[in-house]
Amino acid sequence: MAARTSAGALALSALMVSAFAHAGERWKSADTDGDGKISRAEAKASSPRFAEHFQELDKDGDGYVTSDEMQAMRQQWHERRGELHEQFKKADTDGDGALNLAEAQVAFPKLAENFAKIDTDNDGRITAQEIRAARPH
């Protein structure tokens, strides 16, 4: 269960990392003192989401998130995304490119708990696109 919790935290952090990593101007505007790193106060002022996941991103615990720490988290996210893609393919036992409720219950119990909400077209299957759309933004 710890792995799922960790993966969930990683996924949430990755969303925030992605937003900042793809937006150099946001990083610059968040770095109000221009020292090349983001303090907890700067994170809080720039993005509640960044502040919420600050501790996860501050790998060395020095009270700052550096571009290297952001890049490391982004790399972890890409690796985890690949793992999830493989898990999805393995869980898709009928090979239709989507998960039905039974497949989701076996491979992704937490996902299965929210199956009806994620299955936005109500076809009894959830696609990777529906899963992505259901993620918190």
Image (cartoon, rainbow, N blue to C red):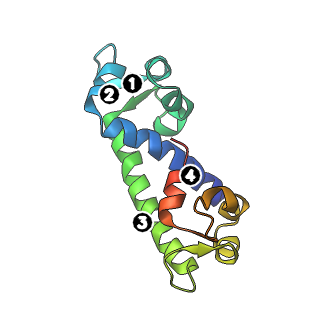
Residue under label 4, please give it: 134
Q: CA gap, disc 2 to disc 1?
A: 8 Å
Q: Earlier in the sequence, mark 4 or mark 1?
A: 1
How far is disc 4 from disc 3 in space, using C-alphas?
18 Å
Residue 121: quarter of image:
bottom right
Q: Residue at x 27, y 27 (%)?
A: 25
Residue type at mark 4 is Ala
Read off the residue under disc 1: 38
Which residue is located at x 53 percent, y 26 percent? 48
- Considering only order in the chain, which callout, 3 or 4, is on the residue closer to the N terminus? 3
Vertical arrangement, residue 10 with respect to residue 43, above or below: below
Residues at marks 3 and 2, CA–CA distance in whole angstroms: 26 Å
Which label number is shown at residue 6? none
Disc 1 marks which amino acid? Ile
Q: At 48% across and 31% down in the image, what residue appears?
A: 50
Q: Residue furthest top?
A: 33
Nearer the N terminus, badge 2 or badge 1? 2
Query: What amino acid is found at the position of numbered circle 2 in the picture?
Result: Trp
Residues at circles 2 and 1 in contact by the CB criterion of under 8 Å: yes
| Residue 110 image position (x, y, % from top left) | 69, 60
125 with respect to 129 (left or right): right
Label 4 with label 3: CB-CB less than 8 Å: no
Going from N to C along the chain, the mark reached first, 1 or 3, is 1
In the picture of the structure, the residue carrying the numbered disc 2 is 27
CA–CA distance between discs 1 and 3?
28 Å
Which secondary structure lies at badge 2? helix
* Number of marks in the rendered image: 4
Q: Amino acid at mark 3?
A: Gly
- The disc, 2 or 4, on the residue closer to the chain's N-terminal end is 2
Q: Secondary structure at mark 1?
A: strand
From the viewer's side, name the closer residue of 135 and 65: 135
Residue toward you, 100 or 37: 100
